[in-house]
Structures are given as C-alpha cells and as structure tokens.
Amino acid sequence: MNVLSQTKTIHHHFADFICSKYNCHDDVLKAIVFCVSYMTASGHSCLSLGTIANKTLRQIIYDENINVDDIEFPDEKTLEKYLLECNAVAKNTDQCKPLVYINGNCYLYRYWNYESIILRFFENILQHVIENSLIASCSKTIDELQVRGIRFSNEQVLAQLTASTHDVCVISGGPGTGKTTVIAAIVYQLLRNNQDCSIALCAPTGKAASRLMQAIAHFKETYVAENPLNFPSEAFTIHRLLGYQKGQLEFYYNEQNPLPYDVVIVDECSMVDIPLMAKLMKALKSNARLILVGDKDQLSSVEAGAFFGDVCWGVSEYSYSDNGKKLLQYCNCAIKENHKKPHPMRDAIVILNKTFRFSADSGIAALAQAIRNNDESKAQEVITNNFADVEFKEYDSLDWLYSQIQDYANSWYSTIIGQADITNAFQKIANLCILTPFNKGPWGVETYNAVIEKQLKPAFGNEWYHGRVIMVTANDYNLEVFNGDTGIYIGDDDAVYFSAAQGFRKIHPSLLTNYVPAYSITVHKGQGSEFEHVVLILPHIDIGNNEHWKMLLTRELLYTAVTRARRKLTILGKKAILQYMVNNPTMRTSGLRQRLWY
C-alpha cells in the first residue's frame, strides 16, 4: 500500500506526483514532501527539518481527519541527505525545481521565490542619505500641525521624519498609539513637499481600507480643511489596488506594468501574507516609496508567512546606524547604547509605544501589555483586580453561555434596528462584538450565530429580516463587496446596505452568495476593527491533548482579541485557558527573518 494513500488530500497527491515524476520512491522522502505541502497550507512558508526530526508523521500532522501511516523520521542530518539526493530539490538559487532546500529549510519553489522578491526589494531600497533641508521642512510642518491641536509623541515625530527621508518605512504600534494619525500626517507631509505626489492608500480588507479612509478624511477636515492639497480620495484593498483579474494568475499591475503611484501606504500589515506582499513589491515603480504600518504583536496572516513580524523582528536585536541616531537625536528619542551591531533595516523601523486611547488605570491596556510581555502573573492580576473596563467570568455549562450570548446580542440588535438613519445604524454595529477563536463546534461562530438567530427569526418569519447583520466571506469584484465587509438588511428597501467610499451601497440579498450572520465573528475576522465592548468567549474545559486547540489558542490571538476593545472587555471562559494562551506564542516557520536580518 502506498504509504500516504489513505490521506486523500491535496498534500498526498502533490507528494505522489512529485516523487513519481522525479523517481523518488522512498517512503520517508515522500513523507517529507507531504509535510512541505502540509506546512505551507498551515501557514508556514517552509518546512524546518528540525521540526520533524526524530518524530513520527502522526506527531506532525495534528489533523486527525487526515489518515497517515506511522512513519518515523530520522535525525536532521539524515533528513538533509534525503533531500540533497532527491532530483526534485534545488540545492542552489540557480536551479528551478519544485522544491528548494537551503539552511535547514525546505520550500515549495513558489514560496522561496516570494521570500526572495521581498529580500531583494529591501536590499535595493535601504540605501539613503538624510538631507538636513528635508528634516527642517518636515519639522516645520509638524510644528504647524501641533499649533492646530495635534500633540505628537516623539515616536510619532520620528515616524514622520523616517517616512519622509527613507524609501521604505515600517511603523508598528499597539492599539491607541496613533498609527492612523501618523499615516494622515505622513500623507500631509508628502503633499506639502510635493503637491504632485501621487499616493495610494491600501489595506488587506475592505473594512480596514474604509477605516483608513475615514481617518484621512477626519484629519483633513479637522486640521487642514483650508489647504487645497489633493489628498487621496479612496483607500483600496490590496487586491483591488493591484487589479485583480478573474481567472488570471497575475494582477493587472505587475513588474512589467507597474503601479502609477509615487508612494504606497499599507495599513494593517500584520494581516498581509508573503505572496501578496511580494506581488505588491514587484508592482511598485523603481523609485516608489513604500510605507508599511501595523502591529507586530497581532495575529499573522491567515495564509503563509509572518511577514510583518519577520520584518520587525530585529528591532531588539540590532542598533541604529549613525544616520538613524541622527533622527533619534532630532526627535528627542532615547538612544540605547546596547553595543549591538547596527543594521540598515533598523533605521527604517519605528515602534510607537505611547498610547493615547487608554488612561493610566485602564485594565484593557494593562492586560494587553501583560500578554505582549508574556507576563502570566500580571495578566492574572488584571482579570482578578476589578478593573472598571475588564471583567472575567468563569462558567460551567454551554446552556448558561448560550443564554448570555442571546442577552448580549438582543441588547445590541435592538440599538441597531432602533436607528432611523442608516449611518447611525452602522455606527451602532461598533458598540459590541462577540469574538471567539473558533469557526465550528460548541464554541464556534456558526453555533453562536445559530443560537442568536433562532431567537430573532421567529419574530420575523423569514431569512431576511429588518436589521439583520451579515458579513461577506469572499471577494465579489462585480458587486464590489469584499471579504470582511459588514452589511445591514433594511426591510423597507429589501436591500443590504454596505459602507462605501461615498456613503453606502445597496445590494439586493438575492445577489449575495458568500455571507454569514455577523452577530458573532472569529478573532481573525475582527482583526483590523475596533468595538466599544468586546465579549471574548473561551472554552470552559481543559485543552488536554487537542492539538488543533494548541495551535489556535495562542498569545497573538489573545492579544488581538483584547486589543479590539475600546472601552469594555468581557472574557467568558476558564482561567487556565487564558494562562495557556499567554504562554503559547504562535510558531510559524519562515526563512524570511533569517535571510533579512542575518
């Protein structure tokens, strides 16, 4: 029997095809190829041989729905020998084979190439000379904005100067650190220096793009309304910016047909996967500037890689060059003489630490910091010390949980349908969000939404009832609705309303094909959004040996969920689960960090 014939997955068929085509018939080698495909589909950009050495295949493949024979992998050196002797594996960058093996990592060729594109981009663009005249011009603009009411932190000033003096700038900050304010100020800086500068704003999701555009519009109206500068009128999803073409492998804009913009600013970069970022970088003009903004401590992208985390990794490992220290001194930012080796990437990265959203006694801020710092005792202290904005409730039955969910949803739903104006109704959506790590099962959004709609539907008698809240789950370029977009059904119009760049778009429900109720959403879907009150639901039973839970219930997921809350955070679950998550960082295998920083 074929050693992997029982799996019946795409990973099995890939391993079978590659090994058959290249006459690699050893069972262990076929299992390695299987793991490369499986790991890539699980979010890793490559397979590290160290993660499978001296383990069985079943220990690697946590999904019990995939049947595999109990193959035992040898030590790492022997695994390397298998790959070096396989004709399907490229051993140097000049070869083009289905697999690439280098520095202990085995890639699908496509993902090796994506990493290489990103690496070449940073290598080619990091050379810069800081001009004193440009610093003076930026500083003058900052002073003018502060006179008009903005109070920038030293780090925000540094971010503006870095973005204005570097061809690539990376800005990372937690919730409430003023990332969108900095983006708006950078746009203003760039236009002040060059009124003809063409700027594209984009984000991974339609919701994140909409929030970015709202922040730009608010900045313009509040601080520079009298200025005739031509601010961007729209923020795109990255796919729409690049020009998605149905049925085509390539975007409309690519290396041969570059984007027409002088500057591209990408928000919510932690959500961007390696393939999409590589395609964006390839589509930039040779002299274009790229500004990347996000939170390095949030969840990584759903697809392969941990791009933003890898790019920001070296901030604690390397020091600034003399050029970087020059900007630090100008902004009155402390220079830590840690005697570490300088790196040009470090100069391009700014970390925003000062929070403007939360007060000094905020439990949400304290809990987020404890999670980020892997401080389990501090996290426990926060959830037990009766902070006004954080509450933790343990429960012991699903019936009690479902009753609580219905109470939360009913109160929230009544505020939405009570609005005569659609704008106000959309604003009320942000009052509450019920978050969970899971899609399916007793603690999944499918169950929660079914429980909620079971109570709501009888009052209306059909699927589409006034005030129904839905979320789109797949991009529809014809209707111009995108994965993550939230809509409200208005009965009088028999239409679902979606927020658009200019007001709202109405779509008849019969035209919508990919959507789900959105009374409860996963933490992944909530990424890039903020809510007044977040209810995070965790299981009330032990994790045990559930490998799927171990992979999903991570520090980054907990941090992302907590930081969606603006004013109130309620956690329902078991304290032991929260403790586990604080101590369980996401482990994503990637060669980008090593290739970029070493």
Image (cartoon, grey):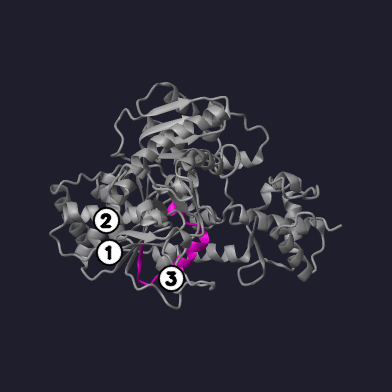
Per the image, the residue denoted by label 1 is 232
Label 2 with label 3: CB-CB less than 8 Å: no
Q: Is residue 283 magenta?
A: yes
Q: Is residue 46 magenta?
A: no
Residue 321 image position (x, y, % from top left):
36, 53
Distance from Cα at disc 2 to Cα at disc 3: 23 Å
| Any part of residue 413 in sight | yes
Q: Secondary structure at mark 3?
A: loop
Per the image, the residue denoted by label 3 is 243
Label whose residue precedes the other's in the sequence (3 or 1): 1
Distance from Cα at disc 2 to Cα at disc 1: 8 Å
Q: Secondary structure at mark 1?
A: loop
Q: Closest to the observer: 260 or 238?
A: 238
Amino acid marked by disc 3: Gly
Residue located farthest toward the right when viewing the structure as drawn: 1
* 484 displayed left or right of 3: left
Residue 191 image position (x, y, % from top left):
22, 64
The residue segment tinted magenta is 269-290
Label 2 with label 1: CB-CB less than 8 Å: yes
Q: Closest to the observer: 342 or 215?
A: 215
Residue at 44% across, 59% down: 482
Amino acid marked by disc 2: Ile
Amino acid marked by disc 1: Pro
Residue located farthest toward the top when viewing the structure as drawn: 385
Quadrant assignment, res 303: bottom right
